Amino acid sequence: MTPMADKPTQTLILVADPMCSWCWGFAPIMRQLRDDFSDRLGIEVLVGGLRPGTVETMDKTMKEYIRHHWEQVHDKTGQPFDFDFFEREGFVYDTEPACRAVVTMREMKPEAALDFLEDLHQANYAENRDVTDSKALAELATKYGVDAADFTRQLESDEARAATQKDFHEARTLGVTGFPTIIARQSNPGEDDQYAFLTLGYRDYESIKPSLSEWTAPH
């Protein structure tokens, strides 16, 4: 929905990566924030790029490192993980394709971008699906009425690749150094937008709600 140009607007920008385990842990909290606050503010998704362009396959050390993070997230949040993931051989943990899929969905069905991000988390972490694979990404996109072939064409386009790199650059420009991050943006007519960090990394809902309630309260 496009806000009226003469009114101040408030927006939450979620900066995340589909292959970031703490972002998966944060997914239920993001869902609750949307349920409670989307009638008062806009919500946008920006992909930050956790390990974009990785070319080396996961070795034993990397598997142990990633598994440790998964165990931490599961213990903290209760989110499900399929640890059979670590039985894969020759897997390249390149997060750029899944990020590009979110950008593609945002272009084709903007209202579905946040849900699609969570679907990618679910597929990667709980279902052990390969979200670096274009075919798997297109199959997940069809849930939102998107034709798989159309999605694949857009996903593999130079435009989608450039738009994804633009997201990465914008996240860095905003000062994002980890995921998930939520940035609160206040847009006032005739003034530069104002930005503030609401979360830098994982935070539970009860620690976020008071400041967000105060920010969105009528003044």
Image (spheres, rainbow, N blue to C red):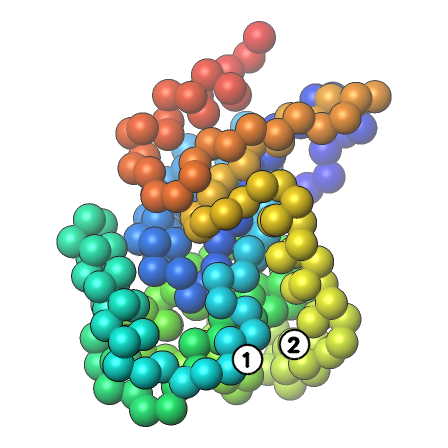
Tell me where residue 184 sits by quadrant: top right
Kind of residue at disc 2? Leu
> Residue 163, can we see it?
yes
Q: Alpha-carbon neighbours of circle 2 within 10 Å: few (<14), some, or many (≥20)?
A: many
Give the percent coordinates (x, y) of residue 77: 22, 50
**Which residue is label 1 attached to?**
138
Q: Is residue 24 above or below residue 218?
A: below
> Farthest right residue?
190
Q: Which residue corresponds to the image point at 55% horizontal and 56% vertical from the top-left?
A: 48
> Which SS class for mark 2?
helix
**Mark 2 against mark 1, which lies toward the viewer?**
2
> Which SS class for mark 1?
helix
Locate the N terminus and report the quarter of the image it occupies.
Answer: top right
In the foreground, 154 or 147: 154
Q: CA distance from mark 2 to mark 1?
A: 9 Å
> Farthest left residue?
75
> Residue 136, can we see it?
no
Q: Which mark is residue 155?
A: 2
Q: Are marks 2 and 1 in contact (CB under 8 Å)?
A: yes
* Left or right side of 167 for 14: left
Q: Alpha-carbon neighbours of circle 1 within 10 Å: few (<14), some, or many (≥20)?
A: many
* Left or right side of 177 for 85: left
Q: Which residue corresponds to the image point at 73% horizontal and 39% vertical from the top-left?
A: 2
Q: Which residue corresponds to the image point at 45% horizontal and 25% vertical from the top-left?
A: 212
* Left or right side of 61 for 199: right
Q: Is residue 11 above or below residue 148?
A: above
Q: Which mark is residue 210?
A: none
Give the percent coordinates (x, y) of residue 124: 36, 72
Give the percent coordinates (x, y) of residue 186: 64, 26
Give the percent coordinates (x, y) of residue 165: 68, 63
Kind of residue at disc 1? Ala
